[in-house]
Image (cartoon, rainbow, N blue to C red):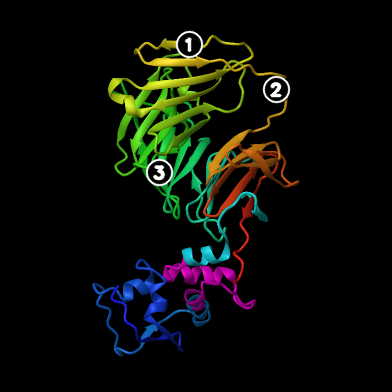
Amino acid sequence: MGIQNDRVRFNVGGKIFETTATTLAVAGRNSFFGAMFDENWNFQTENSHEFFIDRNPNCFSILIDLLRTGELFIPSNIPEKLLYREAQFYGLLDHVRAAKWGPFDGNQVRFSQAVMGQAPGDGTAIRAGPDGGCCVAHGSIVHVYDWMLQELPPINLDYQRVNDIGWIDAETVVAATSERLGRGRGGAALFGAATGELTHRFQVTHEDQVKSYTAGALSFSTDYKIFSSCKGRSNEYGIGVWDQITGQQIDFYYEPIGWSLGDADRLQWLDNTNCLLVATLFPRKDNCYISLLDFREKEHGLVMVRYRGSNHRREAGPRRDRYGREQFHLSRLMKGKMPDEPCYPKLALYDGQLFSSMNDSISVFSGPDWVLTSRLRRSYGGSICDFSIGGDRLFALHSEENVFDIWEAPPPPVT
């Protein structure tokens, strides 16, 4: 970065500031200040002893103090949204977030606020963004919120139902939609998070034909793959796999009629295992299952370990499908009667803690024995139909009211 041990002088909006290059180095190489002092940048000014920046001087003072002390103090006369905007300009938003919130811990989070949705009807999915924002699916529309929880231009899917959504990165959202009857427009597609513009639509090719399909659950791997459960018009059920960067289809894992990969409610890529978990989490009589697709054995045929649950005990033992791939059906006896009203069970594993939602609360389990250590509950909104964790926040979407809650970690103590 070419750090010097002398003082640096700034004129910000007509107000003079002095600091050191060592303090500015805390901002990091990818920040505004990192670019200024990078030896490859060759930044020049009319006065080599002073840098002029045409920005808000009051916010600049707060951000420089944050770099000096690691602590964030926002005076009452400075709107937080104004500071966040300035922090984004200087590339210091991560520093502000780290000072505002402590490490995410499900046992320490507290309710922050509730946000009313901007579309009629119930939401179907909510996903935390990597920068602390989120996106919410309501029918055929995906509403995107930035870190300040300001809504960006909505993504309108032309009256197609959005079944699942996810973030590729802070700039890009992927949506899985149902096929419109007779239109052939369903499937998975990429959209700009800030603009809502369609950037790419993912096709499914099976048996040398491009297929119309309904996309269901989504997941993403660390090597830039997108997975989606797919259901075609002609009973093609399977998992589609695409490259995130090129958008090209990599594979389509097909199951014959009578199996349920294409009906999956949940896909989860398991890091460091090269395996994909496929599940229907809501019991459907004889069709509750968890499958584990092991991609390490792809050259020998995809290995699938399946756990099925039903009201009847099943025999345990290996069998093979029509492609010779070995499967295991393990019995699990479901006891008791399922409730008549939906309970929306959801699971999430985050930083060594297991989160489970049931009805109107989220339970947190910790430790090697997964002991219940906390329960998050709000009385407003009814049952939680979906929740997501990311960007140091937990988002909970309610089913009975068009509202989602935000839970945040408390700020770190001042030392």
Looking at numbered disc 2 in the image, what kind of residue is underneath it?
A: Met
Q: Position of residue 7 (x, y in %)?
A: 38, 87
Question: Under tag 1, what secondary structure?
Answer: strand
Q: Which residue is mark 2?
A: 338
Residue at 71%, 44% (x, y): give it: 381
Question: Is disc 1 in contact with disc 2, using a CB cutoff of under 8 Å?
Answer: no
Discs 1/2, front: 1
The verdict on residue 350 being magenta is: no
Q: Which range is magenta?
A: 65-93
What's the CA distance linking mark 3 and mark 2?
37 Å
Looking at numbered disc 1 in the image, what kind of residue is underneath it?
A: Gly
Q: Nearer the viewer, residue 396 or 39?
A: 39
What's the CA distance linking mark 1 and mark 2?
27 Å
Looking at numbered disc 3 in the image, what kind of residue is underneath it?
A: Leu
- Going by the image, does 86 lie left or right of 2? right
Question: Under tag 3, what secondary structure?
Answer: strand
Q: Which residue is mark 1?
A: 317
Q: Position of residue 139 (x, y in %)?
A: 57, 38
Question: Under tag 2, what secondary structure?
Answer: loop
> Which quarter of the figure has residue 4?
bottom left
N-terminal of the pair, mark 3 or mark 2, is: 3
Q: Residue furthest front?
A: 368
Q: Position of residue 223 (x, y in %)?
A: 34, 41
Q: Position of residue 178 (x, y in %)?
A: 49, 31
Q: Nearer the viewer, residue 18 or 81?
A: 18
Residue at 48%, 11% (x, y): give it: 317
Assess disc 3: are there few (<14), some (14-19) or many (≥20) residues with their C-alpha within 10 Å of its C-alpha.
many
> Which quarter of the figure has residue 332?
top right
Q: Which residue is mark 3?
A: 190
Q: Residue furthest right?
A: 379
